[in-house]
Image (cartoon, rainbow, N blue to C red):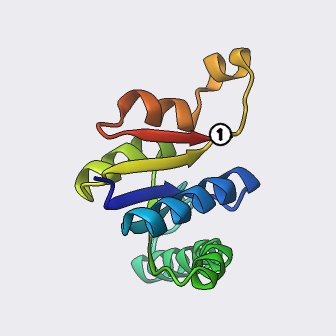
Amino acid sequence: MFSKILVPVDGSENSKRAFNYALYLSKNLKGEVTILNVADAPPTVYLQSQKVLDELLEKYSKAREKVFDDYQELAERESIRIKTKIIFGNPGQEIVKFSLKDESDMIVIGNRGMGHLKEMIIGSVSSTVIHDAKCPVLLVK
């Protein structure tokens, strides 16, 4: 039923709680977990050299991979193997796109608990995912 679970993570306590729920579901449903980190692309406006740009992107990706360390450790404690993926772009939109591409059966996402006014003005990643995803979404508070 839920054999492919996607968990967007950013290192926050809410995303760690969501990840713990995903591990629990994975363990009980024998599913696989993919954690996804969506980052803003590094600024490249002033770079004229492709080599410098490539080096910057590599360093930026390595720094983003450190976000996964805590999640890897939690998964190892539960003897669950996880997949990791970093992509760049608008978080809400990219999570939905990735879930379709990866054929995720479920998305487990943390909620930051933004107020209604702030959410109306700047939007919310979890709100975008809930409204646009084509699979079930579990929102963890």
- Tell which residue pokes out farthest to the front in this image: 28
Task: Tell me, yes or no, if residue 41 can be seen here.
Answer: no
Mark 1 residue element? loop
> Residue drawn 74% across and 22% down?
115
Quarter of the image where one finds residue 60: bottom right
Report x, y in % for residue 69. Answer: 65, 79
Front residue of 70 and 4? 4
Q: Name the residue beneath numbered marker 1.
A: 111
Quarter of the image where one finds residue 50: bottom left
Task: Tell me, yes or no, if residue 63 can be seen here.
Answer: yes
Report x, y in % for residue 129. Answer: 45, 36
The amino acid sitting under disc 1 is Asn
Front residue of 112 and 53? 112
Report x, y in % for residue 12. Answer: 72, 56
Viewed as shown, does residue 104 lie left or right of 33?
left
Front residue of 40 and 104? 104
| As drawn, 111 above or below 67 | above
> Residue drawn 48% across and 74% down?
53
| As drawn, 133 above or below 67 | above
User: Quick one: quadrant of the C terminus?
Assistant: top right
| As drawn, 113 above or below 56 | above
Instruction: Mark 1: give few (<14), some (14-19) or many (20+) Cα within 10 Å.
Output: many
Front residue of 23 and 43? 23
Report x, y in % for residue 98. Answer: 33, 53
